[in-house]
Amino acid sequence: MPARSPALHDLAWFKSSYSGANTTECVETAFIPPGVLIRDSKRPEGPWVAVSAQAWNRFVTARAQ
């Protein structure tokens, strides 16, 4: 992940289209050059988790077993 943390207010955070109207159980993501940041939408100040682009791709394309 980046050597310098990005400014959280400068990122374009978004919720999944599957979130619907329920605002109690959502995560938000933001794309950064080496991957994706993930945070709890109820706690936008953090903490957040950084994952690689490859890990994010595997996650969103995985099928439920």
Image: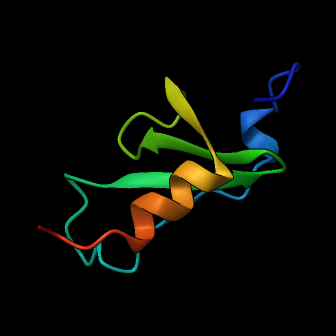
Q: Position of residue 5 (x, y in %)?
A: 80, 24
Left or right of residue 13, residue 23 in this image = left
Q: Is residue 14 above or below residue 38?
A: below
Left or right of residue 25, residue 48 in this image = right
When asked about the image quadrant of residue 12, the answer is bottom right
When asked about the image quadrant of residue 60, the answer is bottom left
* Residue 29 vs residue 8, the one in the foreground: 29
Q: How is the image coloured?
A: rainbow
Q: Position of residue 63 (x, y in %)?
A: 25, 73
Q: Is residue 39 above or below residue 19?
A: above
Quadrant (top left/top right/bottom left/bottom right) for the N terminus: top right
Q: Is residue 44 above or below residue 18?
A: above
Residue depicted at x 83% and y 28%: 2
* Residue 55 vs residue 45, the one in the foreground: 55
Q: Position of residue 4 (x, y in %)?
A: 88, 20
* Residue 7 vs residue 60, the one in the foreground: 60
Residue depicted at x 87% and y 19%: 3
Quadrant (top left/top right/bottom left/bottom right) for the C terminus: bottom left
Q: Residue furthest left?
A: 65
Residue depicted at x 26% and y 78%: 20
Q: Position of residue 11 (x, y in %)?
A: 76, 49
